[in-house]
Each structure stands twice: as C-alpha cells, then as structure tokens.
C-alpha cells in the first residue's frame, strides 16, 4: 500500500482498498467456474460495495442499485438494462446473456426487481454478486437467495484495527487517535470518513477560562466503581485554536492527534439521529443518564410503566443493551460521546455531579493490567478511564502510562506502546520507566536488563538461543513451552506454542514462534502454513521488525522473483514493474504467482512484512 503525504489541514484520504484479503478471495472464487455467485451482507458503511468493486475490477459486468425513491416502481433498478415494457419472463431471458451482474443495496429493490434477481439465481446462467445491508427489511425474494441456499452468503464484519490503521496511514494520525476512531466507528467506514473530515476541516472552539473538569463528574457503575470521566462540554486547557481543525501535532513524531470532545457536525449528527432525536417520552433522558454514568442498574420494581415502555423501545431499536446482571449500557460507544458533547454545560454538571475523582479508577486499571502481565495474559482489557483522559488531553501519571506502554508492547502494538510512553513523559519528562518503554517500542534492546524480569529472560528464546533461558522461565508456562520446542527443533511443537501465545494476546511473540517453526519444518507445506500465519500476525504488530521475522522467506525465491516481489512490496503495480525491468506485464504476473506459491500467501499487501529485515533486497 502506498503512503500519501498530505497536510492535515487539507487531508483528502485516497481510501485505498485495504485488508479483506480472505473476503476478496471468496468473492472472486464465486465468479470462477460454474459457481452461481454470492451474497455479501453486513451493516451499512462496512465496505460491501468497495469489496465488490475490487472483486469485479477488469471484468465485463453490469450493475443495478436499489434506491428508496424507486422502491415502489416495478423494475426501476433495471431500467437501463431492459426495454420500457417487459414481462418478468422476458426480463430473465434478456439478462441471461449478462456474464456477471452486480446488485447493490438489494434490500431497497422493488418486489418485481427482487423477483427478477431471484429468478436469475434459479436459472443460473448469470453470476450474481448481491450486496444487502443488515438491519433493514429486504424483499422476501432477496432474503431467500441465501436462506433458500441459492447463493452462498458472506457476512462482512468490521474492518480489524490493524486494517483501519493502514487505511488511515496517509493521515499521519497518532496511534491513540486511530484507536479512538476505530472504537467510535465500529467498522462504519462512512462514519470514519465523516469524522476524519470533521476533524481536519472543522474549526475548533477556543478554550474557556474555567477549569475543564469543574462540576463534571466521573461515571460510576452500579457497584460504585468509577468507569470514565464524563465528556466535558468545555475544551480542556491547552487545547487551543489551531490551524488544522481539531488535530494537533505530536512533538517529535510528525503525527497528528485528536484530543478533545467529538465535533458534532451535521454529517455526524445525521449518523447519530437515532440516539439524538428520540421522540418518545423519557427516552432521551434515559440515554443522557447512561451517557454520563453507564452501566446503570435496572431496578424493575422501582420503574413505572412509562419508564419500562421507554426502555423497551430503546432496546428494540438497538440503542441500549441489557446485561446479564440487568445493567443498562449504551449499545454504541459513539452515542455516549455525542450525547455528552451535546448535553450543555448545566446538564453535564447535574448528571455528573455526584461522581468521585478519577484517580482511584485509574490506579485500579493499572493494577489490573499488571496482574494480567504477571499471569502471562495480555488479551485486550477495557480501560476507559485512561483512554478518556488521553482523549481529552489530561496529563497521565507516568506510572500508569508506563504500564499501558508495556501492556501494548507485549501485545505487539509497538506504535501504540510508544504513544502511551510519550503521554507519560508529557507530565514527567525524566521518568525512567516511560523512557525505557519508549526506547523498546522504537526498536531498542529487546527487553530490559532486569534479570528478574520474565520477559527479559524470554528474550533469548526470541533471538533463537533457548539454551540461555533453560530453567529460568516459569515451569509449564507458554514461554517455557516455546523455549523447549525451539531447543528440540520441533516444528509442530513450535506451531502449538505459537498458537498458545496468540491466544494469550502475545501477537508478536506468536509471529516469531511461527517464523521459527517455518524454518524448522521438514515438510514444505507445513513450513508454508507456519510462514503464512507468521505473516498474518506480524501484520498486526504495527511495523515490528525483529531478528526472528527478518528475511523470513527471501532465500526461497529466485533472484528475479526477489527483485519483482521487492518492487511489488514498495507499492508498484505489475505494469510499473514491467516498465522498470523491461518485461511484459504477463511475465511479471507469472513471477509474482510463482513467488506467492512459495511464500504461502496470495495477498500483495503482506509483502512488506515478508520482506522486512536485513535480508531485504533493493531493486
């Protein structure tokens, strides 16, 4: 993928096709041979159309799109493909010669058009690629495409965090801003674009003189545990008017950070209309209370009939969730942000007045993270207090920032680890712990020199010298199993150790173990599987380059293949590579196909991770 250098003030992201390699292969496979096609479903804004566009690129195909305006007009979506007056039977015959038909927004088709699509699937002469949004009623003929097993169904989930980060790479945003955007948008790429546009183009309000947190409390759970400070309607001190909208430069990094409340622009407000414009009595009040103090207990015995009805309507519309213990929460994280941002100063003070300060909750988060590191378990944990404070430019205690940086680094999230360390250094520039974590995240020595640190002892295993860690790792632990498998040069055992590491959240360690297994396996197919898994995990590690991952596979390629793969990894197209090397485009494609077979991947975007390291050639 190419990186686009742009000024944050005028940023217009190119939105290249990112991730979705497995989904793309499934859609392309549905067009091959005698297969009838596929239905792609998922929430609005998740990239169904973009995926299909990529799959049919270069293919002769026709396209129809359902629209709300034409939903009551028979065959309106097919008007450009059919005569003015045509029966359903003749329409099927007329379209049987179309090789590939893309049907977008199929849930908005009129009944006759839906029946036509269904009949085309039954006849099987036309390959159908159908996109339908979840959560909206679809004509029965459309839903029967997959429920009746006429076409296979591909549910499209949210874009993973690492792919969201790659999508936003051209914006040069700091990792904590990328994380915040990913969590807020939940895979809705249209909303992501709206928010990014608002952040880079909107005028940020100047700060007021009053203290940012004065009168604005911290939400507490039903048990009294502090969760996260309320969104302040007053910009925080130091977050002044800047020339790049709501983004501010991160010193020494060349990155931009979003610190402050949500910019509720008209576009964002439209996305949030289900929460912000509730017509029912009492509904907006319930949502506001949740925004400042979720989760709330659900005391059924104390609620009158009108409150119960309001809760039922909100749950039916997907705006609130009722947990197993009867606690109420907002269903979408962005709703709380928007509700707090639009509450007004007096309402925010009233709703947040009784909550305690955030320090105890912050310390509780830190202790939880420490316990999980000590248990060798770094799977994701909810940490709303620290994330809220960073989002609103409140200085973090260095001790907390060091712990967050260490937790992120052990997960392989190196850029995020560096960002947390920098947050701690803002308040305490001389803090040794944060400085050490920043050095490690930016490629310093693999682990601290502390001989009592388990991960410091484990560093020898990661460097391929398990003998140095013999007897020095917790007996029976996943780290010890990795060391033992490497010492015995046991490829299958290394695979099992890598799987266990990945299950516990050690993504980078797992990638390294799979890379070691790929070099150890005697069976070439087993080696390719391990290598593919190593690459997939390494891609999630934010540019990590370690000795175990370096030069993973280049030795298996011919000189010409290495040259072509290196250029492809740099972002050149097949045609650009052909022109540079004076080859035909077909020859370049053949070399790449052979290289992909040896590398165990067909994903062009994985090439930078395969080539990273000291063995990488330059063209």
Image (spheres, rainbow, N blue to C red):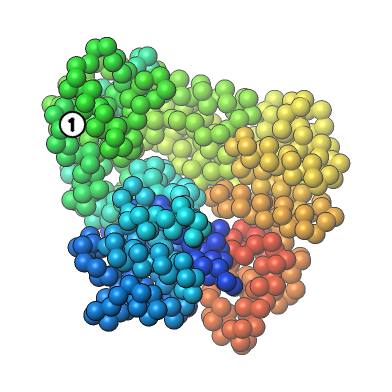
Answer with left or right where residue 240 lies relative to residue 3. Answer: left
- Residue most toward the top? 301
Q: Is residue 62 above or below residue 66?
A: below
Q: Is residue 325 above or below residue 405?
A: above
Q: Quadrant of residue 13?
A: bottom left
Q: Quadrant of residue 437?
A: top right
| Residue at left offset 29%, top offset 35% | 316
**SS class, disc 1:** helix
Query: Which is more toward the observer, 256 or 56?
Result: 56
Residue 300: where, in percent of width, then height? 28, 15
Q: Is residue 503 above or below residue 135?
A: above
Q: Quadrant of the C terminus?
A: bottom right
| Residue at left offset 31%, top offset 50% | 136
Query: Which is more toward the observer, 97 or 294?
Result: 97
Q: Residues within 10 Å of mark 1 (few under 14, many from 20)?
A: some
- According to the picture, the residue beneath numbered tag 1 turns out to be 284
Residue 278: where, in percent of width, then height? 17, 37
Residue 225: where, in percent of width, then height? 38, 17
**How many numbered callouts?**
1
Query: Which is more toward the observer, 495 or 508?
Result: 495
Q: Is residue 605 among what the camera can see?
A: no
| Residue at left offset 72%, top offset 34% | 479
| Residue at left offset 25%, top offset 32% | 314
Answer with left or right where residue 306 lies relative to residue 586. Answer: left
Residue 244: where, in percent of width, then height? 26, 54
Q: Is residue 403 among what the camera can see?
A: yes
């Amino acid at each position: 993928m190419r990186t686009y250098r742009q000024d944050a003030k005028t940023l217009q992201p190119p939105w290249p096709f990112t991730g979705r390699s497995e989904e793309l292969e499934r859609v392309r496979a549905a067009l091959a041979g005698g297969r009838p096609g596929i239905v792609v479903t998922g929430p609005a804004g998740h990239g169904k159309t973009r995926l299909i566009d990529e799959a049919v690129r270069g293919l002769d195909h026709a396209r129809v799109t359902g629209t709300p305006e034409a939903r009551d007009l028979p065959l309106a979506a097919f008007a450009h493909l059919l005569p003015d007056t045509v029966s359903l039977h003749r329409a099927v015959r007329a379209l049987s010669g179309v090789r590939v038909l893309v049907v977008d927004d199929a849930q908005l088709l009129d009944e006759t058009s839906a029946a036509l699509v269904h009949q085309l699937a039954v006849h099987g002469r036309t390959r159908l690629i159908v996109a339908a949004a979840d959560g909206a009623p679809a004509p029965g003929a459309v839903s029967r495409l997959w429920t009746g097993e006429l076409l296979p169904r591909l549910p499209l989930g949210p874009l993973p965090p690492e792919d969201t980060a790659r999508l936003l790479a051209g914006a040069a945003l700091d990792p904590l801003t990328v994380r915040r955007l990913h969590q807020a948008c939940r895979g809705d790429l249209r909303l992501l674009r709206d928010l990014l546009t608002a952040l880079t183009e909107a005028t940020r309000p100047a700060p007021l003189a009053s203290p940012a947190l004065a009168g604005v409390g911290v939400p507490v759970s039903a048990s009294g545990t502090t969760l996260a400070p309320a969104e302040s309607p007053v910009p925080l001190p130091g977050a002044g008017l800047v020339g790049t909208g709501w983004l501010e430069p991160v010193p020494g990094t060349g990155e931009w950070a979003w610190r402050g409340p949500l910019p509720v622009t008209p576009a964002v407000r439209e996305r949030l209309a289900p929460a912000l414009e509730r017509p029912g009595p009492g509904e907006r009040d319930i949502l506001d209370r949740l925004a400042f103090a979720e989760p709330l207990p659900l005391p059924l015995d104390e609620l009158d009939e009108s409150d119960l009805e309001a809760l039922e309507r909100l749950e039916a519309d997907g705006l609130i969730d009722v947990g197993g213990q009867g606690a109420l929460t907002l269903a979408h994280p962005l709703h709380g942000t928007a509700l707090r941002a639009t509450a007004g100063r007096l309402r925010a003070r009233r709703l947040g007045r009784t909550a305690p300060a955030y320090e105890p909750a912050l310390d509780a988060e830190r202790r939880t993270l420490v316990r999980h590191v000590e248990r060798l378990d770094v799977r994701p944990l909810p940490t709303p207090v620290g994330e809220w404070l960073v989002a609103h430019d409140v200085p973090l205690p260095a001790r907390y920032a060091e712990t967050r940086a260490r937790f992120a680094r052990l997960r392989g999230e190196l850029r995020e680890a560096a960002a947390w360390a920098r947050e701690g250094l803002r308040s305490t520039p001389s803090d040794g712990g944060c400085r050490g974590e920043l050095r490690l995240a930016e490629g310093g020595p693999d682990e601290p020199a502390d001989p009592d640190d388990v991960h410091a002892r484990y560093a020898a295993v990661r460097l391929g010298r398990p003998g140095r860690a013999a007897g020095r790792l917790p007996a029976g632990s996943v780290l010890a199993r990795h060391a033992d498998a490497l010492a015995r040069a046991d490829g299958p055992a290394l695979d099992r150790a890598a799987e266990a590491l990945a299950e516990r959240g050690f993504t980078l360690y797992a990638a390294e173990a799979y890379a070691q297994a790929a070099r150890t396996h005697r069976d070439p197919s087993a080696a390719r599987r391990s290598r593919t898994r190593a690459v997939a995990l390494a891609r999630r590690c934010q540019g990590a380059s370690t000795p175990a991952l370096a030069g993973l596979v280049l030795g298996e390629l011919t000189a010409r293949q290495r040259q072509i793969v290196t250029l492809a990894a740099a972002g050149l197209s097949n045609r650009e590579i052909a022109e540079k090397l004076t080859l035909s485009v077909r020859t370049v494609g053949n070399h790449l196909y052979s290289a992909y077979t040896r590398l165990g991947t067909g994903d062009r975007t994985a090439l930078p991770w395969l080539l990273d390291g000291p063995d990488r050639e330059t063209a």
